[in-house]
Amino acid sequence: MQVIKYMFQPHGDERGQLISLEEFNDIPFRIKRVYFMYDTLEGVVRGHHAHKSLEQILVCIHGSCKIRLDNGTESKVIPLEKPYEGLYVPNSMWREMFDFSPDAVLLVFASEIYDEKDYIRDYDEFKRYIESENKHESI
Ligand code: T46
């Protein structure tokens, strides 16, 4: 399973660091929505879903957290610990976010506006969805 992590270029000088992210240049899609989560309680696991179409880039701009990505056959855990690392999460990928440090701020760039119909929130349904997608691809 291929995991794509972007390393953004900080514009550092004697005052500190600045990162600028532009759609299509640094983020590989048109950014239609930005959201972030913070004050995540210890032991909490967020996510537990996949998206049919949505693509996203996750950046832990403060603190740290871990992301589990699962494509239906393989699963990987990716730590996010630096504000210049962006994890690309494609569509049809189950995700869970966990191990948030108390100061973690997880910023997300999303390719679509919020749409509950795009979510698959049941893992067995996700597996069936992946299988049907693979069938279509092999025809
Ligand atoms: C994802 C992971 C990484 C909105 O009203 N608008 C929004 O844009 C979002 C993202 C959420 N919401 C509402 C829906 C729920 O009532 O905020 C509440 C929490 O959302 P959810 O339980 O879906 O949050 P997470 O952390 O489980 O998942 C979120 C995104 O929903 C999801 O697309 O990939 O972060």
Image: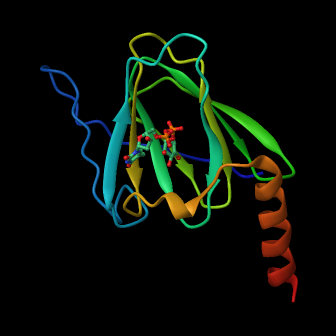
From the top left corner, tell me how far across and down residue 48 is, in percent: 66, 39
From the top left corner, tell me how far across and down residue 56 is, in percent: 48, 53
| Quadrant holding the C terminus | bottom right
Q: In this view, does 29 lie above or below 135?
A: above
Is residue 54 among the parts visible in the rendering? no
From the top left corner, tell me how far across and down residue 12 is, in percent: 22, 30
Q: In this view, does 86 lie above or below 101?
A: below
User: What residue is rendered at 35% in x and 67% in y?
Assistant: 30
User: What residue is rendered at 34% in x and 62% in y?
Assistant: 25
Q: Picture quarter containing residue 40?
A: top left
Is residue 86 among the parts visible in the rendering? yes
Query: On the rendered structure, is 48 left or right of 117?
Result: right
Residue furthest to the bottom in view is 139
From the top left corner, tell me how far across and down residue 128 is, in percent: 84, 63
User: What residue is rendered at 76% in x and 56% in y?
Assistant: 126
User: What residue is rendered at 33% in x and 60% in y?
Assistant: 31
Query: On the rendered structure, is 112 left or right of 6?
Result: left
Query: On the rendered structure, is 134 left or right of 113?
Result: right
Q: Picture quarter containing residue 18?
A: top left
Q: In this view, does 43 lie above or below 77?
A: above
